[in-house]
Every structure is written in structure tokens, then in C-alpha cells.
Image (spheres, helix red, strand yellow):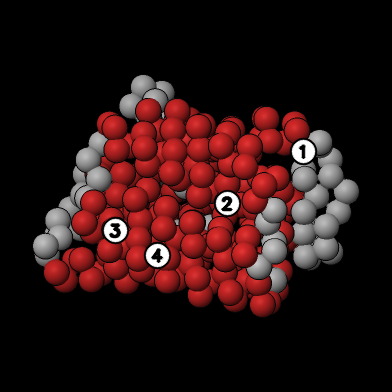
């Protein structure tokens, strides 16, 4: 039925549920699912492709949950989402042509810096603040860069969108999380289209993981909307730190 044995499929589905829950709040769900896909026998390209398949379900669920609760104005975010998706597609299509080794060395340092930023910055809550750049510049420059990165490399995309929304757009933590999920969903779909063109996703297991990812994302987004920055901040700090340590381990 699946591309793997039943016991491995159940492990992947369980990992997807946990990833959906964490990713809907703070990002970093790929930290769970990607290594498990590799452990299940997927090639790196198959793992990246399948991860985009299942990740799209969780991102879509979280994005819809936040939007339906009034935390995102979908009409105002259509253009940034399209830019994020297009950039993710381009990044995925170029994944085999652009050297990313330098990024892999720099990324752990950047993620640790993000964790320190959210851990130590005082007064960081769900209150909006003054924006530092205009929405047009944010959408035209920052969003495509992070979307392209998501298609090209992936880990930490949610954290990068979060810090951009908080430090540049002036959003409160909950609002930043809600908008991050929408743009992350768009870049994920763009990346999926690109990987489907150049790779070979495990469609059956990817769809099964996607359903579990959606269930976890629904639960996580509800918790985030109920508690806000009190749960988002510590989870974001934890996931950014763990992801950085995981990348350092891989490099060593």
C-alpha cells in the first residue's frame, strides 16, 4: 500500500503529527519529518520532495485556522503569498545547480541568533509595534528571499519569516505566527511543484503524513491562538536552538 513497510509508515505518520503541531506554532517541523524520512530509506531528493508533500497539508491547515479566526487578512496577503510561492518554486528548480554548502555553515549561527533574540528581547508579546520598513518593500524584497531559501534549503524558514514580521513589519508574536504560516504554505507549495518536476516524491506516504500533519497543525494553531506569545516564544526559541544543534551535528 505504502512505499515503505507498515511499521515505518506508522512511524512517519506519527512524526508528521508531532511536526504539524510544532510547526503551526513555531516552525521547525521539518526537523522532525526530514530525518525520519531519510531513516525510512528515502533518498535525499525523495525525502525533500515527500517532505514538501506532507508539509503543505500542515501549513495549509495552520494558515486557514489563523485566517478564519481573523488573524490574517487573506486579500491583503495574496500578492506576498504569490511572491513567496514563485520564489519557492525557483529555489527548488535550482537546488541541484546552486552550491549551498556556505549556507549550511552559516545557518546554525543565524538560528542561534534568532533564538537569543526571542529569548532575551524584553516586551516581546502579541502587541503590534511600529514597522521599520514599508509593507511594499517587505513583500517585494524580504518575502521572496525567504521563499527562495525555503525551496533551495528549507530548515528554519518559519523562524526567518517570524523574525522578519516581528522586527521589520512590527507585528506582535501571534500575528507574526499567523502570517508566517500563510507565506510558508505558499513557499512550500512552490517548492513542491519544483521538487515534483525534478524529484520523485513518495505520494502515498506523503499524503498519509499530510493528513496527520494537518491534524497536528489544527491542534497547535488552536493552542497558539488561545495562549499567544506565552507558548509561541519558548517553543520558537527551543525549535531554533534544536535545529541549529542538529545542523551542527550533521556538519560534524
User: Which residue in the protein does label 2 denote?
Assistant: 182
Q: CA distance from mark 1 to mark 2?
A: 16 Å
> Of the residues under marks 4 and 1, which one precedes in the sequence?
1
Q: Residue 207 bears which disc, if any?
A: 3
> Is residue 135 among the parts visible in the rendering?
yes
Rendered residue at 58%/41% (across/down)? 81
> Of the residues under marks 1 and 2, which one precedes in the sequence?
1
Q: Residue furthest right?
A: 130
* Front residue of this view, candidates 203 and 107: 203
Q: Residue furthest front?
A: 75
Rendered residue at 70%/45% (across/down)? 76
> Is residue 151 among the parts visible in the rendering?
no
> Of the residues under marks 4 and 3, which one precedes in the sequence?
3
x then y, percent, for residue 42: 21, 49
Rendered residue at 44%/38% (across/down)? 190
> Of the residues under marks 1 and 3, which one precedes in the sequence?
1
Give the crowd class for mark 2: few <14, some 14-19, many >=20 residues within 10 Å. Answer: many
Q: Residue 213 bears which disc, if any?
A: 4
User: At numbered mark 3, what does the secondary structure look like: helix, strand or loop?
Assistant: helix
Q: Is residue 9 left or right of residue 166?
A: left
Asked whether the residues under the numbered discs 1 and 3 touch, taking CB atoms below 8 Å apart as contact, a structural biologist would say no
Give the crowd class for mark 3: few <14, some 14-19, many >=20 residues within 10 Å. Answer: some
Q: Residue furthest top?
A: 97
User: Which residue in the protein does label 1 denote?
Assistant: 135
Rendered residue at 39%/25% (across/down)? 94
Amino acid at each position: 500500500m505504502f512505499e515503505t513497510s507498515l511499521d515505518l509508515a506508522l512511524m512517519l505518520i506519527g512524526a508528521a503529527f508531532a511536526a504539524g503541531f510544532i510547526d503551526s506554532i513555531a516552525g521547525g517541523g521539518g526537523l522532525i519529518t526530514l530525518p525520519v524520512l531519510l531513516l525510512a530509506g528515502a533518498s535525499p531528493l525523495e525525502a525533500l520532495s515527500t517532505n514538501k508533500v506532507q508539509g503543505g497539508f500542515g501549513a495549509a491547515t495552520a494558515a486557514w485556522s489563523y485566517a478564519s479566526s481573523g488573524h490574517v487578512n487573506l486579500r491583503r496577503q495574496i500578492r506576498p503569498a504569490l511572491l513567496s510561492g514563485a520564489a519557492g518554486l525557483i529555489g527548488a528548480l535550482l537546488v541541484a545547480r546552486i552550491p549551498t554548502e556556505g549556507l549550511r555553515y552559516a545557518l546554525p549561527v543565524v538560528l542561534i541568533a534568532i533564538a537569543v533574540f526571542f529569548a532575551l528581547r524584553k516586551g516581546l508579546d502579541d502587541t503590534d509595534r511600529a514597522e521599520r520598513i514599508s509593507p511594499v518593500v517587505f513583500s517585494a524584497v524580504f518575502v521572496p528571499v525567504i521563499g527562495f531559501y525555503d525551496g533551495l534549503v528549507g530548515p528554519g524558514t518559519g523562524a526567518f519569516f517570524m523574525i522578519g514580521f516581528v522586527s521589520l513589519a512590527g507585528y506582535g508574536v501571534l500575528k507574526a505566527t499567523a502570517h508566517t504560516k500563510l507565506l510558508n504554505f505558499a513557499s512550500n507549495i512552490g517548492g513542491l511543484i519544483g521538487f515534483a518536476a525534478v524529484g520523485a516524491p513518495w505520494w502515498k506516504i506523503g499524503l498519509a503524513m499530510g493528513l496527520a500533519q494537518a491534524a497536528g497543525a489544527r491542534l497547535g494553531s488552536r493552542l497558539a491562538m488561545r495562549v499567544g506569545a506565552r507558548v509561541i516564544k519558548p517553543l520558537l526559541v527551543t525549535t531554533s536552538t534544536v535545529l541549529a544543534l542538529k545542523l551542527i551535528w550533521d556538519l560534524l
